[in-house]
Amino acid sequence: MEMPSKLKFSFFETSNRKTFSFYIPLKNERIGNIQFELIKNMNGQHLSNANIITRIMGSFLEVRPKFGSAPFLKLMHMANLDLFVMWDTGIKTKYNIPIYYITNYSKWY
């Protein structure tokens, strides 16, 4: 059974709202020189850059419909163009990067 479009959008909106505050400590980070183990204070929590990124992606992967990671990576890319590289199936295919699903959302296919 296909999920109604309004409900799908609701999942995206909720995930995006939950992750908004996580982008703030990453605003000056760049893909070429990010220190993943650098600890930042986020509302009293001490989190590494790697942990912040993991929490952003984890929030999106909680969305149950089978969207895969591409839509979320695009949202992350728009939030910080210099940090998050946009990869989708078309880009992976063009660069001959193998496509496989090993993350939590794979069970929903």
Image (tube, helix red, strand yellow):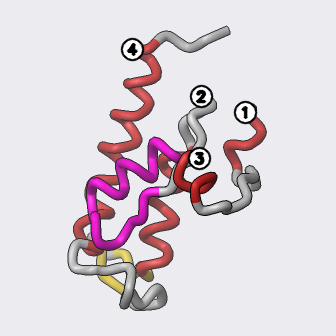
Disc 4 on helix, strand or loop? helix
What residue is rendered at 48% in x and 61% in y?
55
> Mark 2 — residue?
65
Q: First in sequence, mark 3 or 2: give its number.
A: 2
> Mark 4 is on which residue type?
Lys
Q: Position of residue 7 (x, y in %)?
A: 44, 17
Q: Earlier in the sequence, mark 2 or mark 1?
A: 2
The quadrant of the image that shows the C terminus is top right
**Label 1 element class:** helix
Taking 106 as reference, is 77 left or right?
left
Q: Which mark is residue 89?
A: 3
For the residues carrying marks 3 and 2, which lies nearer the camera in this image? 3
Question: What is the three-letter code of the residue carrying label 3?
Answer: Thr
Q: CA distance from mark 3 to mark 2?
A: 18 Å
- How far from the left and from the top, in percent, is residue 94? 58, 55
Residue at the disc numbered 1: 108
Residue contact between numbered discs 2 and 1, judged by CB atoms under 8 Å: yes
Looking at the image, tell me whether mark 4 or mark 1 is earlier in sequence order.
Answer: 4
